[in-house]
Image (cartoon, helix red, strand yellow):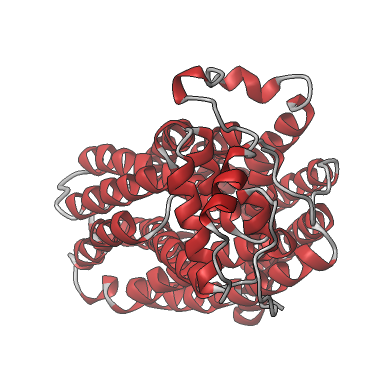
Amino acid sequence: MLTADVDRIPTGKSLTERLDALPFTRRHGSLLAGSGIGWALDAFDVGLISFVIAQLSVTWAADASALSWVASAGFAGMAVGAALGGLLADKLGRKQVFALTLLLYGAATGASALAWSVGILLVLRFIVGLGLGAELPVASTLVSEFAPRRIRGRIVVLLEGFWAIGWLGSAVVGYLVIPTSADGWRWALLIGMLPAVWAVFVRLRLPESVRFLQSQGRHREAERIVVQFEASAGLASPPSDSTRDVVDREPSAGHAPNARTALRLADLFSAELRRRSILIWLVWFLVNFSYYGAFIWLPTLLVAAGFPLVKSFEFTLIITVAQLPGYVASAYLVEKWGRRITLSTFLIGSAVSAVAFGFGAVNVSDVQIIGFGMLLSFFNLGAWGALYAITPELYPTRLRGSGSGSAAGFGRIASIAAPLVVPPLLVLGGPILLFVVFGIVFVLAAVAAFALPELRGEALLE
């Protein structure tokens, strides 16, 4: 239930308390949709490269090791981008960095369509990764800081659910466009320029985080945005004197931007944050390893198992559809069970599904590959939703972007390594060994996730 009947603004409350007390409004919906479309375009780009690699393995006759570096170059960029994007979001603002990252990776994706060698494609994919990596933690931070407390986790999971839409879009383009000609992958990447266009909308229409504005001493801007959200809920604005009183009572009032405590990554490992930072970094690392190791190589693995290129793309498209109900289930359960139980449960489900999929790939069974592949999609993407919900909640406002970005950046190290270890693991033990390794990693992630604090229904740290 995202709405509630409210007829007046509670007086004497801070701006953040007023945001937390709101029902889900049209303004929240616009923020979710605007950020979510950017998120879907991000997923579209990441998913598309798996289909590009599958075609280039045929049209360019490139070996698996060379193509694995193309995927890993993008993830290397994402690792750097996530860390830098989080830092910039805490210094320049969530909305500004969000728009900049969309513009960067959209333009670089279009340029990738002109690549004439694996080396050039590798360089361009690194640049694409810079934008991709920065966009995700910044978007989730922005949405979490506006979402009402009682449904914050659900809203962030719904944001993450746009990933499935984007990945599904990449599967459709991969299935319908890439196989049409030897240059099909180029046309697909040109479609990936859409984020550059969307960046203009983001820059003009999405609001800046109220919590960020307060941390900068920009209270009047913050007040105007809160009033807009309250008006969207049908609430009357408080009298001007009352408004000034509320603003003056904000915890950060009176602190000019240059008087704020200097932002340092070391602060993420202060005594009160050290344990949660170590745990969330570990979860991000392990989930990235298994997810990208499996899904980036999925079309290529199916081709190697003897399926035609078009058939492998068709199977991937069907498997991708299961991501959507995974997000829906996770969005419901993060507020019903809590963040860490939902995350741990979906990770255990991912582990079982990964092992089962490995055996199905060996048997070359259509039913097993599709069935267990869909289960892997369902549980793994549900886990991603819960992970994005809990990460911004772990940190105070001045460190929220940096905390989310650094965890994502550390996780991207695993996504760099994962595509590189797939070929040798396949040589060593085939799909069974590969997916058993992924299953073990998912179990370790579940253990770390269960040790995180449960923050369902709690106010964000200021």
Q: Which residue: 70% across, 35% down?
A: 282
| Residue 117 falls in image quadrant | top left
Q: Position of residue 337 (x, y in %)?
A: 85, 64
Q: Which of 148 and 318 is in front in this view?
A: 148
Q: Nearer the viewer, residue 399 or 66?
A: 399
| Residue 189 falls in image quadrant | bottom left
Q: Is residue 440 left or right of residue 69?
A: right
Q: Which residue: 33% across, 50% down?
A: 99
| Residue 153 falls in image quadrant | bottom right
Q: Nearer the viewer, residue 281 or 290?
A: 281
Q: Which residue: 80% across, 54% down?
A: 344
Q: Is residue 88 above or below residue 51?
A: above
Q: In this view, does 242 lie to the left or right of 162?
A: right
Q: In this view, does 386 lie above or below 22?
A: above
Which quarter of the rendering shows the N terminus?
Answer: bottom right
Q: In this view, does 178 lie to the left or right of 73?
A: left
Which quarter of the rendering shows the C terminus?
Answer: top right
Q: In this view, does 363 lie above or below 428?
A: below
Q: In this view, does 324 lie above or below 457?
A: below
Q: Is residue 386 visible?
A: yes
Number of numbered discs on residues: 0
Q: Position of residue 219 (x, y in %)?
A: 49, 41
Q: Which residue: 45% across, 45% down?
A: 220
Q: Position of residue 341 (x, y in %)?
A: 84, 56
Q: Position of residue 347 (x, y in %)?
A: 75, 56
Q: Can residue 429 be seen in this view?
A: no
